[in-house]
Image (cartoon, rainbow, N blue to C red):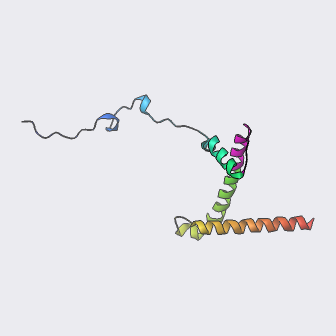
Amino acid sequence: MPGPATAQAYGLNRPGAQIPKRHRQRLRRVDAMQGVTRPAIRRLARRGGVIRIQREIYDTIRCVLRKELESIIGKLVSMFGGTDEAKTRPSIPERTRKVRLSLQSKKQSTDNYADSNAR
């Protein structure tokens, strides 16, 4: 009678296995904004009341979306990046982020209003 079978690792998961090229993960340098697909942009446009969309608009929308996201994230990093609050808490609650962003936007709008009246 043979003894108990020992557990052996088979396949690509065993240590020291040569992984064939077809199973290797490739590093892709894909622009993340291409993940905002045409149907997603169409759905957003439909929600906004747009009926027809030109073909060139999709890339333009992706560029505008990237700039807006960079602006918002930049503001959040500048607000929370060097504070003691960021060091003590691993994440900032959504309500705090919204309040601070709204205060920032109100400050900018009053600054723009003061600049336009000064002229």
Residue sitting at 62 percent across and 45 percent down? 40
Image quadrant in which the N terminus is located: top left
Name the residue at 68% across, 48% down.
46
Residue 118 spot, x, y in % from top left: 91, 67
Would residue 88 appear left or right of 67 to someone viewing this image?
left
Q: Is 100 a magenta residue?
A: no
Q: Tell me the magenta residue range.
A: 49-66
Please identify the quarter of the rendering in which residue 6 is found: top left
**Residue 54: quarter of image:** top right
Tell me if residue 19 comes above or below residue 44 in the rendering. Answer: above
Q: Position of residue 102 (x, y in %)?
A: 70, 67
Left or right of residue 73, residue 28 in this image: left
Q: Residue furthest top?
A: 21
Q: Residue furthest left?
A: 1
Do we see residue 80 in this rendering?
A: yes
How many marks are shown on the rendered structure?
A: 0
From the viewer's perspective, tell me whether residue 8 is left or right of residue 53. left
Residue 64 lies within the magenta run: yes
Q: Residue at x 64, y 66 (%)?
A: 98
Write down the quadrant of residue 95 in the picture.
bottom right
Task: State the quadrant of the C terminus.
Answer: bottom right
User: Can you give x and y, in whole percent of width and height, for residue 58 in the image?
Assistant: 70, 41
Residue 71 location (% of width, % of height):
70, 56
